[in-house]
Image (cartoon, rainbow, N blue to C red):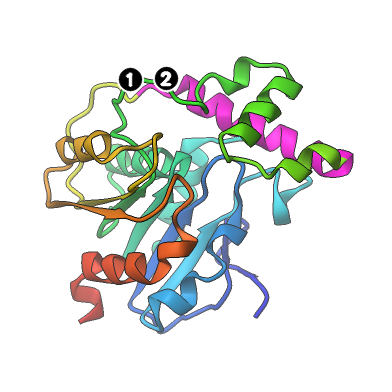
Amino acid sequence: MNGQILPDKWFVSRELRPEAPVRLVCFPYAGGGTAVYTRWPAALGPEVEVAALALPGRERRLGEPAAVEVERIAEAVAAAADRPYALFGHSMGALLAFEVVRWLRRAGAELPLHLFVSGCPRPDHPRGDDVFDGLSALPDGAMLERLVRGGGLPAFVLDEPDLLELVLPVCRADFGWLDAYDCGAEPPVPVPITAFVGSEDASARPEDAAGWAAHTTGPFAQHVVPGGHFFLDDNLDAIGRAVRAGIGSPLS
């Protein structure tokens, strides 16, 4: 089934499930889009509607300037909360989902049942020692070269001028947001958090991701799965089971 836009342009689902008791809103990693979560509806089963966040400047929203704006995203999440929901984010998407939860709390909006963070150290982890840190300050060529070296882009993209024209604004927006990110001091959120980390991921080691526990007043769990930073596809069944278990009662 082709992707379908949910209540507004911010969300795309590969399979609409109006009878599903819970919705999982999935946030992409830097440079990624809704296609990252194409296989997720099958892995999560009929009781979960998977809605992938569609950020400006990519895929269906290609004609819009690339941007990462927490307030706009959080407003869209709140407006679409027609049933219990949970948030999942990988890498940049984890920080973005976390900031959306904090915005929703400040606004007095309905909070998610659960926050799933993946491939991301704790939000107050010092930045600067990762291959993806500081990318927004580099010239285009150096930024792209480091992305390829770190596995964030396939090498063939460098030889495709038309594709590069689409990729560069998105990378600039995403890594600009990441480089400017400051966790700040706020109380822990009243939302359970589950962290997923790759066993070979130097960007988010288990001991760094364990610090997410300090940012919730609810339960915290961590799952270490095989692989490097981009471990989602290779571990989708196991991640799907853990997500369903974390969501809990709406699926019982």
- Taking the image as shown, residue 59 lies to the left or right of residue 249, namely right
Q: Main secondary structure of the magenta part?
A: helix
Q: CA distance from mark 2 to mark 1?
A: 8 Å
Q: Quadrant of the C terminus?
A: bottom left
Q: Is residue 110 magenta?
A: no
**Splitting the image into 4 quarters, where does residue 123 fall?**
top left
Q: Which mark is residue 126?
A: 1
Residue 78: x and y in percent read 41, 53
In the image, what residue occupies the spot 39% across and 68% down? 23
Magenta-highlighted residues: 161-182
Residue 98: x and y in percent read 34, 41
Q: Amino acid at mark 2?
A: Asp
Query: Can I make out residue 177 in this image?
Result: yes
Instruction: State the SS at label 2.
Output: loop
- Taking the image as shown, residue 56 lies to the left or right of residue 124, namely right
- Taking the image as shown, residue 176 lies to the left or right of residue 185, namely right
**Splitting the image into 4 quarters, where does residue 85 fall?**
bottom left
> Badge 2: few (under 14), some or many (20 or more) residues near its Cα, within 10 Å?
few
Q: Nearer the viewer, residue 49 or 83?
A: 49
Q: Are marks 2 and 1 in contact (CB under 8 Å)?
A: yes
Where is 30 relative to 77, above or below?
above
Find disc 2 in the rendering and name its residue.
129
